[in-house]
Amino acid sequence: MSHEDEPNQNIWKFEHSIECPVSRDFAWQFWIDLANWPVVDSSVESVKLDGPFAAGARGITKPRDLPPVEWQITEVQDRGSARIEIPAPGAVLKCFWKFEDSTTGGVRITETVSMEGERAGEYVEKVGPELESGIPQAMRRLAEEMTRAANKQGSE
């Protein structure tokens, strides 16, 4: 079977965008500072990265009361976008973040999440609905924390 004949194994995809009244540069620096991840997501206990925020770097997120989750940054365009992949047996969860200047003078942040692979359907059944409801909430919290940090920086 040639590569072109293989079925598309992108089983599931979800995308959500938010606008935030901070500059794209500020948003990017806030987001790649892993110390902010537990601030934005209270279910995260800690996050570690084995080097700078760059393609090829590997990270571990420790959720509260759950085993650590290993991931890898597979693509970075400075101040513009990044892709993080979380492998699972028979599938991979891909999270693509895009940062763009918005028409209102702030930043528009889009997260696109997809699950691919032969066992993707199994994982989507388990976590798809949770991701679809949780991602918009998490992105609102991200925008709130970015705005709070920018306002605090501006008042210092």
Image (cartoon, grey):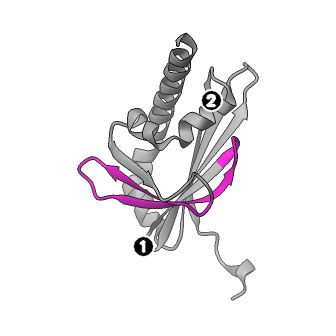
In-image side of 40 versus 84 (left or right): left
Image mark for residue 130: none
Residue 133 in view, yes or no: no
* Mark 1 neighbour class, 10 Å CA radius: few under 14, some 14 to 19, many 20 or more: few
**Mark 2–mark 1 contact, CB under 8 Å?**
no
In-image side of 11 versus 2 (left or right): left
Quick one: 33 or 69, which is closer to the camera?
A: 33
Q: Quadrant of residue 56?
A: bottom right
What percent of the width, then of the height, locates residue 49? Answer: 47, 55
Which element carries disc 2, helix, strand or loop? helix
Distance from disc 2 to disc 1, alpha carbons, whole Å, reads 36 Å
Residue at the image position 42 percent from the left and 73 percent from the top: 89
In-image side of 138 versus 52 (left or right): left
Residue at the image position 50 percent from the left and 28 percent from the top: 140
What percent of the width, then of the height, locates residue 129? Answer: 42, 47
What percent of the width, then of the height, locates residue 131? Answer: 44, 46
Which element carries disc 1, helix, strand or loop? loop
Residue 109 in view, yes or no: yes
Image mark for residue 89: 1
Of all residues, the one furthest to the top in this rendering is: 155
Q: Quadrant of the N terminus?
A: bottom right
Image mark for residue 26: 2
Quick one: 7 or 50, which is closer to the camera?
A: 50
Instruction: Specify which label sits upstream in the sequence, 2 or 1.
Output: 2
Residue range highlighted in magenta: 55-81
The three-letter amino acid code for the residue at tag 1 is Pro
